[in-house]
């Protein structure tokens, strides 16, 4: 039967055939039943069409998410064979070097997983690599958020949740690699016990409670196991869910560009594009982790032997995310004091407890400190290029430098032995480096960002260097500049012009002194420091003046590979040469304005 047709505005319809009822799709009844009772259909339809921007840097958070999924999968496998017990057993497994040796059941089952359980070593190493990848991707993701200003209003709470995830991930990783009860992990537990005891007054009580008595006790491995597989994963799951919900609620930040504003999101819908890409990316992360677990050895516990409190592994190093704390312990001066009969070990308490508290305390307060200094209380959904916030970039570079130097100091003994140096010389050098290095990093990064701002300004005003040199009739030489792409010019000039805050009048019209004058003066000084030497983006008048100056002096011309071009104003040269006629120069105009 043919479909209805229309000719000259009139429709001649053919009687339709009896409609055949469509066969319901499998599972449609269950979905309808749930939708009628929960009303999720409309909500799901809206969220599945939600748009997310596309950029490679946004994949860092996805790596952390999929690494956590891999941790859950491999952790379930390992929990089927691992026994978190410190009961002493005689090892009779496949590894001949340790056969007949007395050890804890936790260590024995870890060896069984490595040598006797099919796929056990692969799962162990995948789990360990996934943990390192989880923390590394979270760290780099947080750095991306910091340097691009993605923590600004309304995302301060999500920033704090991210910091909590990173801190819990560090504790979770430490608990995880302490479970095998080998000599290396036991050395880490001994350091943790010393940090517990450094707490004034109650330190010994905390240690006895954690270890079930005098170190090493009989309870620490079972208790760490409960924390590692139950408590911390539950907290991580809850915080990840809250993080994702706030991400959807606030909408994802995006890089500035044509058509992108604070009021929209340019990208792809969650279903089907983004879900397909995210699903494929999960298998990439899983495949890379499996490849690393199969080919790259990590944490060979059979080489360390069972834990013995009287022994320490030579050159022992913690996992990379704990190395900076270990470095702080190694660099700290031997300060101790007595107060009311109690010995206070500042050399252990300050780096062991103070460093992590200082780091996460400063990072948690930073969004509110920056907002107070700058006075910016608006919502922001566009990211900032680090060069456009030179002071923030300088602080970030200083923090990364301090972290890196502390991390290097955690291997001072290895550095001393490998380079035939005195370990005391290495310690003294690193003490000065940890103080001076961040200051130098702040100055260099800030000046570098300001230089990049000047480069962007010149690029917008005068275009890019083409590498073509021309000679004027007077004999002077100049380089031809060509205008940059309009979309790139838009991205380079989309940031705001910022000016330091000014102190308000000391008194009102009636002569009444304004309250909080001292705080305002401090804020104004900090604001001047924050925006000192900042290079403003070119104004419309400046762009027009640059274009007019280039055209008036004969700097603009067409013809270089078919592209519009002009001589940079800063050269002061004149267009000339046998292949460059004055008529061509006069008839062209620079298009620097974007």
Image (spheres, rainbow, N blue to C red):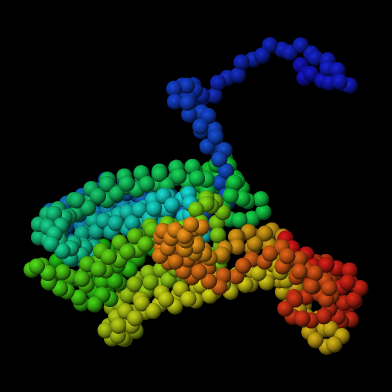
How many marks the image carries: the answer is: 0
Residue 44: x percent and y percent? 51, 33
The quadrant the N terminus occupies is: top right
- Give the camera-side residue of 98 and 467: 467
Looking at the rendering, which quadrant does residue 95 occupy?
bottom left
Looking at the rendering, which quadrant does residue 289 occupy?
bottom left
Relative vertical location of residue 484 with respect to residue 211 in this rendering, above or below: below
In the rendered view, does 276 fall on the left or right side of 359? Answer: right
For the question of whether residue 295 can be seen, the reply is no
The residue under the point 72% across, 71% down is 462
The residue under the point 87% across, 73% down is 585
In the rendered view, does 393 fall on the left or right side of 74? Answer: right
In the rendered view, does 289 fall on the left or right side of 227? Answer: right
In the rendered view, does 584 fall on the left or right side of 94? Answer: right
Spot the residue most to the left: 341
Spot the residue most to the bottom: 475
Spot the residue most to the front: 510
Looking at the rendering, which quadrant does residue 276 occupy?
top right
Spot the residue most to the right: 583
- Give the camera-side residue of 71 and 168: 168
Relative vertical location of residue 268 with respect to residue 526 in this rendering, above or below: above
The residue under the point 13% across, 59% down is 202
- Give the camera-side residue of 280 and 264: 264
Residue 74: x percent and y percent? 35, 49
For the question of whether residue 48 can be seen, the reply is yes
The residue under the point 79% across, 18% down is 4
Residue 246: x percent and y percent? 45, 44
Residue 214: x percent and y percent? 9, 60
The quadrant the C terminus occupies is: bottom right
């Amino acid at each position: 039967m043919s479909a209805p047709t229309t000719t000259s505005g009139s429709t001649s319809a053919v009687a339709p055939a009896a409609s055949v009822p469509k066969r319901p799709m499998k599972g449609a009844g269950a979905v309808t039943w749930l939708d009628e009772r929960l009303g999720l259909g409309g909500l799901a339809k809206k969220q599945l069409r939600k748009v997310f921007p596309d950029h490679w840097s946004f994949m860092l958070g996805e790596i952390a998410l999929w690494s956590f999924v891999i941790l859950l999968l491999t952790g379930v496998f390992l929990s089927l064979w691992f026994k978190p017990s410190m009961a002493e057993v005689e090892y009779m497994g496949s590894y001949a070097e340790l056969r007949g040796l007395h050890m804890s059941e936790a260590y024995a089952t870890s060896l069984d997983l490595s040598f006797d359980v099919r796929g056990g070593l692969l799962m162990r190493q995948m789990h360990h690599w996934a943990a390192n990848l989880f923390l590394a991707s979270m760290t780099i993701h947080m750095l991306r958020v910091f340097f691009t200003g993605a923590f600004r209003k309304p995302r301060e709470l999500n920033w704090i949740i991210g910091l909590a995830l990173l801190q819990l991930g560090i504790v979770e990783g430490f608990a995880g690699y302490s479970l095998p009860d080998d000599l290396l992990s036991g050395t880490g537990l001994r350091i943790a016990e010393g940090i517990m005891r450094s707490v004034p007054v109650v330190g010994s009580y905390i240690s006895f409670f954690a270890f079930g008595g005098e170190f090493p006790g009989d309870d620490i491995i079972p208790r760490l196991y409960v924390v590692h597989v139950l408590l911390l994963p539950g907290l991580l799951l809850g915080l990840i869910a809250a993080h994702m919900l706030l991400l959807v609620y606030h909408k994802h930040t995006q890089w500035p560009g044509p058509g992108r504003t604070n009021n929209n999101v340019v990208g792809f819908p969650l279903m089907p594009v983004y879900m397909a890409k995210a699903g494929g990316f999960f298998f990439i992360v899983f495949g890379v982790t499996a490849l690393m677990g199969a080919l790259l050895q990590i944490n060979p516990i059979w080489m360390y032997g069972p834990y013995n409190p009287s022994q320490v592994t030579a050159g022992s190093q913690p996992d990379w995310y704990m190395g900076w704390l270990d470095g702080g312990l190694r660099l700290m001066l031997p300060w101790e004091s007595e107060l009311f009969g109690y010995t206070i070990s500042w050399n252990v308490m300050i780096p062991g407890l103070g460093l992590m508290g200082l780091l996460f305390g400063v990072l948690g307060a930073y969004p509110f400190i920056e907002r107070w200094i700058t006075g910016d209380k608006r919502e922001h959904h566009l990211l900032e290029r680090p060069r456009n916030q030179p002071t923030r970039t300088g602080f970030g570079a200083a923090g990364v430098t301090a972290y890196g130097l502390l991390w290097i100091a955690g291997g001072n003994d290895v550095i001393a032995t490998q380079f035939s140096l005195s370990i005391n010389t290495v310690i003294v050098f690193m003490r000065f480096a940890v103080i001076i290095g961040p200051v130098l990093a702040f100055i260099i990064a800030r000046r570098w960002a300001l230089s990049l701002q000047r480069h962007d300004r010149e690029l917008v005003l005068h275009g890019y260097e083409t590498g073509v040199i021309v000679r004027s009739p007077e004999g002077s030489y100049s380089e031809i500049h060509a205008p940059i792409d309009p979309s790139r010019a838009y991205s380079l000039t989309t940031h705001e012009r910022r000016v330091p805050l000014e102190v308000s009048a000391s008194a009102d019209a009636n002569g009444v002194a304004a309250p909080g004058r001292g705080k305002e003066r401090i804020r104004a000084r900090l604001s001047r420091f924050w925006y000192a030497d900042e290079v403003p983006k070119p104004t419309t008048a400046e762009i027009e003046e640059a274009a007019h100056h280039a055209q008036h002096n004969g700097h603009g011309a067409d013809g270089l590979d078919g592209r519009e071009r002009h001589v940079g104003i800063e050269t002061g040269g004149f267009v000339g040469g046998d292949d460059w006629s004055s008529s061509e120069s006069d008839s062209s105009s620079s298009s620097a304005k974007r």
